[in-house]
Amino acid sequence: MNKNNDELEKLQETALRYYWQPTQPWNEIAEMGPEIADASDGIRIRINGKWGIDAMSGLVLVNVGHGRSSIVEAINQQLTQIHYGNTFTTSSPAVIQLAEKLASITPGDLNRTLFTSGGSEAVETALKIAYQYHVNRGEPQRAKFIARQGSYHGISRGALGVTSRAVDAVELFAPIMSNTTRLAPQPQYYWREDRAQTLEEFSHDCATAIEDIILAEGPETFAAVIAEPISFSAGVAVPGSNYWPLLREICDKYGLLLIADEVINGFGRTGKWFGIQNWDVIPDLMTVAKGITSGYWPVGACIARDHVFDAFKGDMDVTYRHHFTYGGHPAGGAAGLVNLQIMEEEGLVDNAARVGSYLISKLKELESHNSVIEARGIGLLCALELVADKGNRTPFTSLDGAAKRLTRILAESGVYTRANDHLFIAPPLTTTEDDVDALVEMVDKSLAMVEMEFGLS
Ligand SMILES: Cc1ncc(COP(=O)(O)O)c(C=O)c1O
């Protein structure tokens, strides 16, 4: 339906009256008006009546693009046949088949999938599995986790417990959190203090800082390390080639499980099926969501290696007692199967690698802007590091209102994404080189406009 202005205004009024928009300050919503997305197709989405490129794939999940009728049909068929079958004792065919499919595309012996309805639940699941794994093996004192500064792993209490991005109000909720997480440095090369360090040296130090934490408090007290292979929230932090192999070695040496949070990285985003495959490393647990169905149905999952699941084989005392009502929903199984089939048939993982390297080369050209200090990325997961002052590397958000203004100018020119100290560019994996040209041109012009308005030109 094409909303005319009256309809749109009426909906906005209703939203202002009844809808609780998470994460955004009320004053801004009231002033700017709620944003209403009501149609989408391919890499484009319509918001408040205006079509534009969905340059962040929704919340980095619409991997196969919008408007895939084959996924919708599969969901429809599934719901008609059986719409709910995932009780404590039952599962349904599509869900079992999706678990089998995941085992075939994940690296190594990551063969066992427990489904959830989203990424935070997948992280909750992984943290609890990691702890009970040690309990079942006679080490109940292994109750702490190591995460990295600036990471986001979800918003529920457990997942928030390993999240440290300031914007998620971690400090506000600190009094109701358990104090079981220790924070290690994020391998975000841009953040290094010693500017002379190479990427490999910096990455080595970030990995060995984890070993230092383990040794300081005792290896026997830690359950696991959780990390995104490439942290999105830290502005797309692609570590040096030594980081992940070293992290694997450290976890093995001290008996910690390694959890790779692939909620954003997974399903082709980085030009590999999974982000971790950019290095020859197999984590013990993997959390996935988002791209598993490209958002056509809410699905998340925790995938475990054989040796992890083996610790849960037995009677009730070792059984993992953890279940979400919507985890393993049949429609999610059906959506996931067709979504992955599309990715395979259309070669979208390879497309992400190929178009992604074109995208990053074009984004690099934007480093000539006074507000862009660095373009970085891997596959179709890219970001511009924005600054108010290149010489001092002053964060862009220190310019009051500039990030919001940039987001708005981009939207007006036809690019939907989000700017803070980073401008994220992560379009659907179906994006072509021509789309990239159009997208980057609009970003280029929008940056110039905001720079002029804020005296950066
Ligand atoms: C790395 C990572 N882990 C976990 C989550 C939480 O996923 P959800 O929003 O589906 O709960 C997110 C969400 O963006 C994420 O980026």
Image (cartoon, helix red, strand yellow):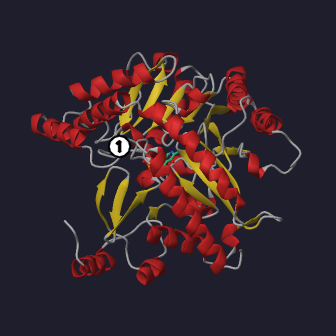
Mark 1 surroundings within 10 Å by alpha-carbon count, few (fewer than 14), some (14 through 19), many (20 or more) = many
Residue 197 vs residue 258, the one in the foreground = 197
Residue in the picture at 13% in, 37% down: 77
**Direction from residue 26 to residue 140 in the image, left or right:** right
Residue 395 vs residue 215, the one in the foreground = 395
Residue 381 vs residue 21, the one in the foreground = 381
Q: Is 115 above or below relative to 264?
A: above
Q: Quadrant of the N terminus?
A: bottom left
Quarter of the rendering containing residue 69: top left
Q: Is 347 above or below relative to 309?
A: below
Q: Check disc 1 and report the residue beneath it.
A: 117
Find residue 55 and report its horizontal and vertical position in percent: 47, 55
Find residue 380 and report its horizontal and vertical position in percent: 52, 43
Residue in the picture at 65% in, 47% down: 376
Residue in the picture at 69% in, 44% down: 182
**Direction from residue 343 to residue 23 in the image, left or right:** right
Find residue 426 and report its horizontal and vertical position in percent: 50, 49
**Direction from residue 427 to residue 218 in the image, left or right:** right
